[in-house]
Structures are given as structure tokens and as C-alpha cells.
Image (tube, rainbow, N blue to C red):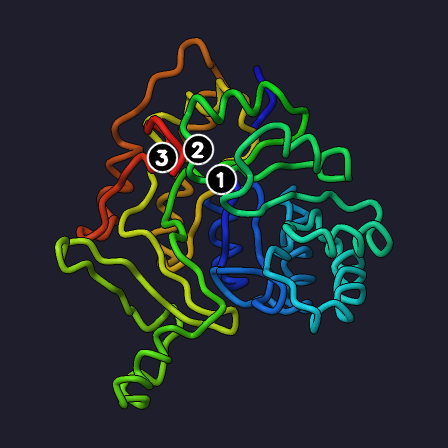
Amino acid sequence: MMDKPELLATAASLEELERLMAAGADAFVIGEAKYGMRLAGEFDIGMIAEAVKLAKPKGVRIYAAMNNLMGNEILESLSGYIAALSEAGVDAIVFGDPAVLMAARVHAPGMALHWNAEMTSTNYVTANYWGRRGATRYVLARELNMEQVAETTSNTELEVQVQVHGMTNIYHSKRSLVGSYMDHQEEPDRLPNLDKERGLYVMEAERKDERYPIFEDKNGTHMMSSDDICMIENLHELLEAGVYSLKIEGIMKSVAYNETVIRAYRQAIDAYIADPAGYEFQDEWLEAIQAVQDPNRELSYGFFFKEQVY
């Protein structure tokens, strides 16, 4: 029996975290918008500590998201925040900025570090660069195809993480673009709520059947993909390639949807680990997801079977 990979999830609340643990999640990425980017929900330090208390007895790991774009104004608070995460018992910090790494070395020297810089994590040399500086995990860009993923896992000793399900970010700006547009239209009060609960989306004139969710928060404007990655049929290829962490992105999804997805991937992973040579995909795993999938959002393979990075 091979080593068990990790099924990683997001959570919008402590209640969802408990339900997804029961569904089979091994670990969670949570945090607050001041330090983390595009989170499913807001977890202050007290809630993070509570999440750790809920997770530890079940062997579930909690990772704190600190992958935001760090401006000068946030630097003074990094040390205290990281020390508080360490005291709370957080298992790892997800970071992209060296400022976080430097603060963690001093204030959480024993904590694991997961390097996540979105689309710039595209090769194994970069992985090993950050590994020499203390990173223990490399979060791959979602634009890589299967061959590139396998080549990276074969050339680094770091844990490799990929997203296997859910929507992805396709555009980000620190500017409040939707709010600015409404101001330009002289309708500033028309959309008083621009967060991810509002259900806003944009469309292209030539492809009106494609809807791209868009929202704004204190970190600016975020535009998301019009489809959802779904790699459950080809999960065995990622496991064969040596991918350790398989992430389910639950942002802007209901708890019931995320529970269904976690259960399906849990069954697929466990079946493969129990007997890799005799593994066979079961249609009911995908069918369970299809039954709760928004009919306006296609399930896709993302970039996993495309030829190039773009």
C-alpha cells in the first residue's frame, strides 16, 4: 500500500470545516483577507485556533493562508500574526512573499511552509530554489499540463500540490474595477454589495453563454473561471505522477456541493491507494458531482491536457 496523499479543502466557516472533515478532507486552507487571497470565508486568529482544536484530534491539518500581495503597511503586523498562528498550533503557512518566509523563520521556526505564487510556480528549478530557503511544499500553477506536472514531481523532493476541482482565478487587480465602473456610469448605489455572495458575473459579447463570476473585496477585483476543473476521472494519473496534495477549491460553492465533491474524491483516492494496480474508476463518483453541478458551469479538465502554458 502506497503512502496516502492529502485531500485538501477550503471552508467558509467552522461549521463547513466540521462537515467537510466528516466527508473525508485531510487538511484545510483558511485565513483572513488581510493576509490571504480569495478565501472561501473569513477566519480571524481566534477562529483559526478553534479550527485547530476541532481538527487535531481527527488527524486533520490546518494551513493558514498568507499568500496575499504584501504592501509596506502590513509588514509591522506579520511577526505578531505568525507568532499567533504558531501558538494556535497551525500546521503550515501558505506564502508567496519572501517577507512572510523571513518572519516565519524567526517567529515560527518549526512550521512547514507552502510556497504558492499562483501562475509563476511553473518549473522544478523554482521549486528547489524555494526548498533551499525553507519551503516544504510547492503549489503548482493551474496552467500546467499533466506532462509538466509529472516532470516537476520527478525533479523535486518538495511535496507538490495541484488543484483538482473547482473554479480558478483568471484575473486580479488591486483596483476596485466594478465599483469604478458604476461610479463612471453615475450609478454608485446600484450595486452596494460587490462581494462574492452577490452573484455578479461578466460575459463576452461573442460568447454570451459563458459567465465569469466577479467580485470585489479589500484586496481588489477578482474574476473567476466560467467552468470548474474536475479531475476525478483522471485522478490516478496525478497519483501515479507523485502529486501529494489534491486541492478541492470550494470558494463560491455551497456546503452541500463541497460535501458531495469531497466524498467523491475521498472514495476515488482510497480506492486507488488500496490497490493501485487494480484500480478502476467508478462512474457513480462523477455522477454524484454532476447531480449537484450548476448546469451553467461546465466540468472541465482545465489545462491538464493542453499542449502549452498560456
Above or below residue 198? Residue 303 is above
Name the N-terminal-most of marks 3 and 2. Answer: 2
| Label drawn at residue 303 | 3
Q: Quadrant of residue 176?
A: bottom left
Q: Position of residue 113 (x, y in %)?
A: 71, 44
Q: From the top left corner, tell me how far across and down residue 144 is, in percent.
A: 44, 33
Residue type at numbered disc 3: Phe
CB contact under 8 Å: marks 1 and 2? yes
Amino acid type at circle 2 is Leu
Give the labeled residue for mark 2.
144
Question: What residue did someone put label 1 on?
Answer: 141
Amino acid on which the number 1 mark rests in the picture: Ala
Q: For the residues labelled 3 and 2, say whether their Cβ atoms are less than 8 Å apart.
A: yes
Q: Secondary structure at mark 2?
A: loop
Vertical position of residue 209 compared to residue 42: above or below: above
Q: 206 or 273, which is in the foreground? A: 206
Quick one: label 3 or label 1, which is nearer the N terminus? 1
At 57% across and 47% down in the image, what residue appears? Answer: 117
Task: Give 153 or 20, whichever is nearer the viewer.
Answer: 153
